[in-house]
Image (cartoon, helix red, strand yellow):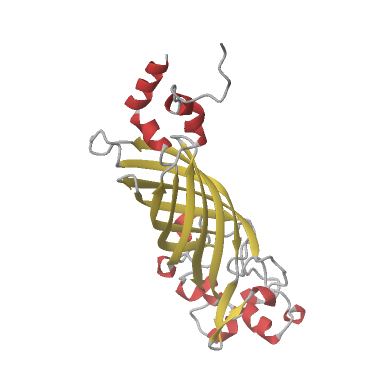
Amino acid sequence: MRKLLMIFVLVTGSISGYSQYVWDFGGHVGASNYLGEMGGKADTRKNLIADLKLSKTQLTLGGFARYQFSPYVAAKAGIDWVRIGGNDYLCSNIGRAGRNLSFQNDIIDMELTAQVFFVDIPDLGHTFRYSNDFKMYAFAGVGALYSNPKTHYNGSWVALQPLQTEGVHYSKFVASVPVGLGFYFSIDKKHRIGWEFNWRTTFSDYLDDVSSVYVDPSKLSSQEAIALANRRGELGNTSSVADPKNYIPGAKRGDPTHNDSYLSSSITYSYIIRGRSAFYVSKYGNVFNQNKYKKSNKPAKF
């Protein structure tokens, strides 16, 4: 029985190969964008990527550690810096353009995700060495982020959260749900190069500091808050923007029925650390680690 098990593991090299290379550490760099109150074209709000403004694509980068529990499941922990931004000036919707708001947000994002592999080619090129492979996966998990939206005003960047431009004190710390797809190539059992798409749905509608309605200026804390809560006046009286009556206290400023989300598309690289998983040791450790000639500490019996 022991010999049959050994033959089976050697023949299915994907298991034995995986078991010795379970940790990898690396980073990524790519592009990021967001979906919220700023963006879109002439129509009103649309779902998914229909409101994406490609001209506001920004940068993201980060690092991660990944541990593979089995040939089919891995866990990944990562920390990312993600920049997102938006500007009503770029929108052809008259209502949004007349609102004249803008923001930039440098997000610090921490995530823990589970990856499920649904494509696995353990021996690229059929070399029978199992040194190069290809994997594709889907993932989902939980995340936490630090958000600090700012806007450019009077020649400098001003943090918006302390100003409470809608009379709401929202938190800079936000929970999120990351989901996505990715793939990677393993090269010489040392390097992994791949691509990953990550969409984070957040539990906040204030990544861009816009969510609900215009408030009475008398309820705001400072002249700066009043100026940045309603920037319609900076446009003057032009025919290219909506009626000024649409920007009075109580009028719609955002869409509180949908939280903000953001996404990234990144190139990834990681270095593989040799080791054996608990799965491997529990299943095959007794088979391959036995030493029948090992000396015993027990006293001899005569």
- What is the number of callouts on the image? 0
**Horizontal and vertical percent position of residue 295:** 49, 25
Q: Where is residue 235 in the image (x, y as percent from the top left)?
A: 53, 84
Residue under the point 38% across and 17% down: 3
Frontmost residue, 296 versus 119: 296
Say whether residue 25 is visible.
yes
Residue 157: percent from left, percent from top: 56, 81
Is residue 87 shown above or below 227? above
The answer to which quarter of the image holds residue 186 is: top left
Task: List the single residue furthest toward the right.
Answer: 219
State left or right for residue 19 relative to residue 258. left
Q: Residue at x 57, y 60 (%)?
A: 260
**Residue closer to the observer: 125 or 155:** 125
Q: Is residue 225 above or below residue 66?
A: below
Q: Which residue lies furthest to the front in this view?
A: 302
The picture quadrant where one finds residue 248 is bottom right
Residue 37 visible in rendering: no
As displayed, is residue 155 above or below residue 177?
A: below
* Residue 123 horizontal side relative to residue 179, left or right: left
Q: Which residue is drawn at 45% across and 73% down?
A: 90
Instruction: Residue at 43% x, 67% y: name it.
Output: 59
Displayed quadrant of residue 122: top left
- Which quadrant would the C terminus be assigned to in this image? top right
- The residue sitting at the top extreme is 302
Give coordinates of residue 36: x percent, y percent.
55, 63
Looking at the rendering, in which quadrant would you find the N terminus? top left
